[in-house]
Structure formats: structure tokens, C-alpha cells
């Protein structure tokens, strides 16, 4: 399984712990930045990189971290075929996968410590989508809208 990981400066330390955690698993992990702590960086760049990587690699997953998780979630969800979910606990991670086939997990560095992050990531990566017609129909509708100003 391929996993693309990214964070801004605020999520940088937690991302480093995440990379260590994932290294012990049987995943192909790619760090999409930030590659160093820089208070001047924006959440947009790693969110765009992860969203593009997941979109271009079917059956892969992304994990994004910023201060609140709101910014990376909003940025990633601007891409078709990306279903980014901000999950703050194991139940939300489980439902994001089972009900919405989320392919990008967004985490808050402000509200999450290393242990909680590991629990949420473990559930997200090990929960399968429950393939019901109504769920597939709803997911397909996410990409119906045309870009507009």
C-alpha cells in the first residue's frame, strides 16, 4: 500500500513521528513535505502534493497534518477523486473509511498527540469501505460539480 504524507510547519514534528510509525509497517511511504521546520510555510503546498499523488495513484492513501487540520482538508478536497476527512478520533476515522471511502486522512497537530495519532492512523488504514449502492452513488456525486467562480 502506498501512503503519501505531508504537513506544514505546525504539523512537522508530528509528521516526523508518523513517518517513524509507518516505517515499522509494510507500507510504501513517500514524504511530500515540508522537509524542514519553517514557520513561514503554508499548508497548501503539502496538501496539494499529497492530493495529486493520491489522485495519480489509485488505491493509495494520503495523510496530512496542520495546526487545526481544517486548512489541509479544504485544500485537498478541491481535487476530484479526493475524499479528505478530518478525523480527530478512531470512530470518525472508521466512519470516514466505511461510509465515505475517504482516501486522505487529515490530522490536527494542535489537538492530537503521538499516541492518539497512531490510533487514528491505524484504524483509518485498516478499515475497508462498506460498498453499498447508496454510498457509491453519494461518493460519485462529489465530483459532479463543475468549477465555478
Image (cartoon, rainbow, N blue to C red):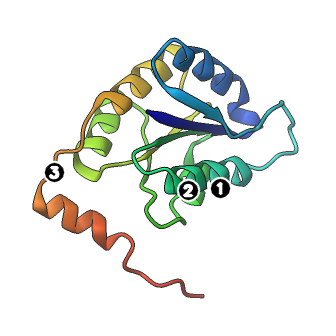
Which is more toward the observer, 37 or 132? 132
| Pointers 2 and 1 in contact (C-beta within 8 Å) | yes
Q: Quadrant of residue 89?
A: top left
User: Where is mark 3, residue-wise?
Assistant: 131
Residue drawn at (60%, 88%), measured in percent from left and top? 149
Q: Secondary structure at mark 2?
A: helix
Residue at the left extreme of this rendering: 133
User: Where is mark 2, residue-wise?
Assistant: 76
Residue drawn at (43%, 33%), measured in percent from left and top? 1
User: Where is mark 1, residue-wise?
Assistant: 48
Residue drawn at (37%, 31%), measured in percent from left and top? 125
Residue drawn at (73%, 52%), measured in percent from left and top? 45
Q: Secondary structure at mark 1?
A: helix
Q: Position of residue 92 (x, y in %)?
A: 32, 38
- The disc, 3 or 2, on the residue closer to the chain's N-terminal end is 2
Q: Position of residue 72 (x, y in %)?
A: 60, 50
**Pointer 1: residues within 10 angstroms few (<14), some, or many (20+)?**
some
Horizontal relation, residue 51 to residue 143: left or right: right
Give the CA separation, mark 3 to mark 2.
23 Å
Q: Quadrant of residue 113?
A: top right
Give the CA separation, mark 2 to mark 1.
6 Å
77 lies above or below 43: below
Amino acid at each position: 500500500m502506498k501512503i503519501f504524507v505531508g504537513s506544514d510547519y505546525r504539523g512537522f514534528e508530528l509528521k516526523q513521528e508518523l513517518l517513524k510509525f509507518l516505517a515499522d509497517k509494510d507500507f510504501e511511504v513517500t514524504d511530500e513535505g515540508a522537509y524542514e521546520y519553517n514557520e513561514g510555510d503554508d499548508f497548501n503546498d503539502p496538501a496539494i502534493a499529497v492530493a495529486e499523488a493520491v489522485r495519480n495513484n489509485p488505491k493509495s492513501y494520503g495523510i496530512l497534518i496542520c495546526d487545526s487540520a481544517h486548512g489541509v482538508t479544504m485544500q485537498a478536497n478541491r481535487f476530484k477523486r479526493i475524499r479528505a476527512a478530518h478525523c480527530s478520533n478512531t470512530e470518525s476515522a472508521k466512519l470516514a473509511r466505511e461510509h465515505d471511502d475517504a482516501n486522505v486522512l487529515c490530522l490536527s497537530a494542535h489537538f492530537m498527540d503521538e499516541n492518539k495519532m497512531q490510533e487514528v492512523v491505524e484504524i483509518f488504514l485498516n478499515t475497508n469501505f462498506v460498498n453499498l449502492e447508496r454510498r457509491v452513488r453519494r461518493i460519485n456525486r462529489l465530483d459532479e460539480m463543475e468549477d465555478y467562480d
